[in-house]
Image: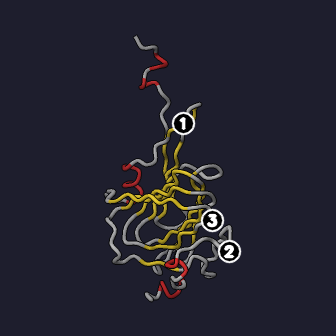
Amino acid sequence: AMEKKDRLDRLPRTGMGIERGRIEGVWRLVTEPVDDERGFFTETYRGALIEEALGRPFRFAQGNHSRSVAGTLRGFRCEPWDKLVYVAHGTALIVVADPRPASPTFGQHEVFHLGDAPGGRDRILISKGLANAFYCVTEVDYINDVSAEYSPDGRRGFLWNDPELGVDWPTESPILSLADRSLPPFRDFVAGA
């Protein structure tokens, strides 16, 4: 016979909540990891919470995983799909910017620290039409689950260090791809250039 303490239905459950971000269309899925001598366990999302926040059905169509070395900055991308981002390993600074002229939060940005301490195990839900970028404080495994399969149509970006946005990045000289160095300024992006 199993002792009560060994029964799986007696193990502690993780919790999860959702908080609206400052940017219209951004939510933080707040996790409650359970730690013990082996490490930790956490839920990373609940579909019902996502659908409630968006006010519409949500489905994952593609999952993406990138690994980046410390000091890398992957620049602002605005895509026609919802994104649910998570840092599975390492610590990253995630920045969401609002390039939608009709939005009440147009031109604003919001910063999240995710991953290993001092980051958090939360996930960020980013509605289509918003842009996000991230800086890798350490080596980072970045998980990006999206609501549509990849297509280059409608995928655009803008400069990571545009002074109009005023993002306080940890460095002025990150490791950047040629594509990220070549993106237009925020104003040109908004104007459709």
Give the residue number, with chain letter if any, for mark 3.
Answer: 71
Give the residue number, with chain letter if any, for mark 2.
Answer: 172
Residue at 45 percent across and 89 percent down: it is 193
- Cα–Cα gap, marks 2 and 1: 37 Å
Report the front residue among 117 and 103: 117
Q: Residue furthest top?
A: 1
Q: In the drawing, what numbered circle is on residue 105?
A: none
Q: Is residue 36 above or below residue 63?
A: above
Q: Is residue 70 above or below residue 155?
A: above
Report the front residue among 107 and 115: 115
Label 2 or label 1, whichever lies nearer to me, is: 2
Crowding near the residue tagged with mark 2, few <14, some 14–19, many ≥20 C-alpha atoms within 10 Å: few
Residue at 57 percent across and 69 percent down: it is 73
Q: Is residue 182 above or below residue 53?
A: below
Q: Mark 3 is on which residue type? A: Gly
Crowding near the residue tagged with mark 1, few <14, some 14–19, many ≥20 C-alpha atoms within 10 Å: some
Give the residue number, with chain letter if any, for mark 1.
Answer: 34
Residue at 47 percent across and 27 percent down: it is 11
x then y, percent, for residue 189: 48, 84
- Cα–Cα gap, marks 2 and 3: 10 Å
Q: Earlier in the sequence, mark 3 or mark 1?
A: 1
Q: In the shown orientation, is residue 191 left or right of residue 152?
A: right
Q: Mark 1 is on which residue type? A: Val
Report the front residue among 78 and 69: 69
Q: Earlier in the sequence, mark 2 or mark 3?
A: 3
- Cα–Cα gap, marks 3 and 1: 30 Å
User: How many discs appear?
Assistant: 3
Q: In the shown orientation, is residue 96 left or right of residue 145?
A: right
